Image: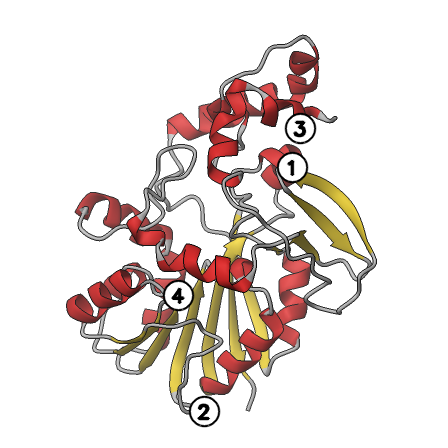
């Protein structure tokens, strides 16, 4: 067994087991970008593995079945969806936490506000409406959200027209939106090519397409590997890098203009997190030795801290 597997079985790894080990992924899949089954193992994450296809795309397998994944997301906002550090992924009524999470999305919000003040905006995976809340202007708001409670909240608070379904089953007229946003969506997709091509059809020529996702080619992902804080084998099944997300966008009718790496203007750029960067990096370096001697540090000291490059936002425009 390797270092992560020993840690997984220890008392210190109990939180990992509780969060990842309660599901039963059983759907072995091929590469979502090229269809090949030829792949190499990068590392294990509990019951699943992160692998790299011969084409360079990385993904998690086995995955939850479509039905199990649908049930998981449908109930997501009724669960205690905190990460390992206690942060809520999304929320409804906590104004301070909403403000911080809106700031996390400042790149997508600023690009949208700069592009249009009155256009039609579609937020795929709109959650509790954090992106909508940050917009300024008189945009016409539309959303797609699988959680019924989140969809109701966004409809009532922002007067948005939200379809409570998956993006695969959503229906909109072609070329009907000025901006389409997918914040933290593409890492969840089983068939990203199909979804992106569908979303692009809904976008008007010259329209703005935004995506954001973890970057598994970032410094923290490279150093911490299995202990990268944004790993989640139940949800984050498409393991994107700048190279592979550019390939995905090239398969749709859009031109990638820029990739942004938000960090310095988010809640995570502070003295505490900078100190964690040095501490946790040192712990990760010596962790194999510590584990060999039966010492298992707390999970909060072995996970990667937030840092520049861990999140990437793509800015693309539809051709034509």
Circle 3 SS class = helix
Query: Which of the numbered marks, if any, corresponds to residue 132?
Result: none
Q: Are marks 4 and 3 in contact (CB under 8 Å)?
A: no
Q: Are marks 1 and 2 in contact (CB under 8 Å)?
A: no
Vertical side of 48 occupied by 64: above or below: below
Quarter of the image that includes the N terminus = top right
Q: Residue furthest top?
A: 293
Indicate the quadrant where residue 134 lies.
bottom left
Quarter of the image that includes the C terminus = bottom right
Q: Nearer the viewer, mark 1 or mark 3?
A: 3
Q: Are marks 2 and 3 in contact (CB under 8 Å)?
A: no
Sequence-earlier tag: 1 or 3: 3
Sequence-earlier tag: 4 or 2: 4
Spatial separation of the CA atoms under disc 1 and disc 4 = 27 Å
Circle 4 SS class = loop
Q: How many marks?
A: 4
Q: State the image coordinates of residue 151 (x, y, percent, origin top left).
A: 27, 67
Sequence-earlier tag: 1 or 2: 2
Quickly name the residue at label 2: 174
Query: Which of the numbered marks, if any, corresponds to residue 5?
Result: 3
Sequence-earlier tag: 1 or 4: 4
At 37% from the left and 56% from the top, the residue drawn is 105
Q: State the image coordinates of residue 81 (x, y, percent, origin top left).
A: 36, 44
Res 232 visible: yes
Spatial separation of the CA atoms under disc 4 and disc 2 = 19 Å
At 62% from the left and 73% from the top, the residue drawn is 193
Sequence-earlier tag: 2 or 3: 3
Q: Nearer the viewer, mark 4 or mark 3?
A: 3
Q: State the image coordinates of residue 93 (x, y, percent, origin top left).
A: 17, 50
Quickly name the residue at label 1: 225
Query: Which of the numbered marks, if any, corresponds to residue 125?
Result: 4
């Amino acid at each position: 067994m390797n270092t992560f597997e020993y840690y997984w079985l220890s008392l210190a790894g109990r939180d990992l087991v509780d969060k990842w080990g309660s599901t039963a992924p059983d759907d072995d899949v091929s590469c979502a970008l090229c269809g090949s089954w030829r792949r190499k193992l990068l590392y294990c994450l509990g019951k699943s593995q992160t692998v790299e296809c011969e084409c360079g795309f990385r993904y998690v397998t086995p995955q939850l079945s479509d039905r199990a994944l649908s049930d998981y997301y449908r109930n997501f906002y009724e669960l205690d969806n905190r990460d390992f550090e206690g942060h809520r992924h999304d929320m409804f009524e906590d104004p301070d936490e909403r403000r911080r999470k809106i700031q996390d999305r400042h790149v997508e919000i600023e690009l949208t506000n700069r592009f249009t003040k009155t256009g039609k905006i579609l937020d795929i995976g709109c959650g509790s409406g954090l992106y909508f809340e940050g917009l300024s202007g008189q945009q016409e708001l539309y959303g797609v959200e699988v959680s019924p409670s989140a969809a109701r909240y966004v409809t009532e608070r922002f007067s948005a027209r939200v379809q409570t379904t998956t993006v695969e089953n959503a229906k909109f007229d072609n070329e009907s939106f000025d901006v389409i946003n997918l914040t933290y969506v593409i890492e969840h997709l089983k068939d990203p090519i199909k979804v992106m091509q569908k979303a692009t059809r809904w976008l008007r020529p010259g329209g703005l397409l935004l995506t954001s996702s973890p970057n598994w080619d970032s410094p923290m992902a490279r150093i911490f590997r299995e202990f990268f804080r944004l790993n989640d084998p139940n949800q984050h099944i498409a393991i994107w890098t700048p190279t592979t997300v550019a390939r995905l966008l090239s398969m749709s009718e859009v031109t990638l203009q820029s990739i942004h790496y938000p960090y310095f203007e988010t809640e995570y750029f502070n003295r505490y997190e900078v100190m964690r960067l040095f501490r946790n990096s040192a712990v990760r370096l010596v962790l194999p030795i510590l584990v060999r001697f039966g010492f298992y540090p707390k999970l909060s000291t072995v996970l990667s801290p937030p840092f520049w490059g861990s999140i990437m936002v793509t800015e693309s425009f539809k051709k034509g």
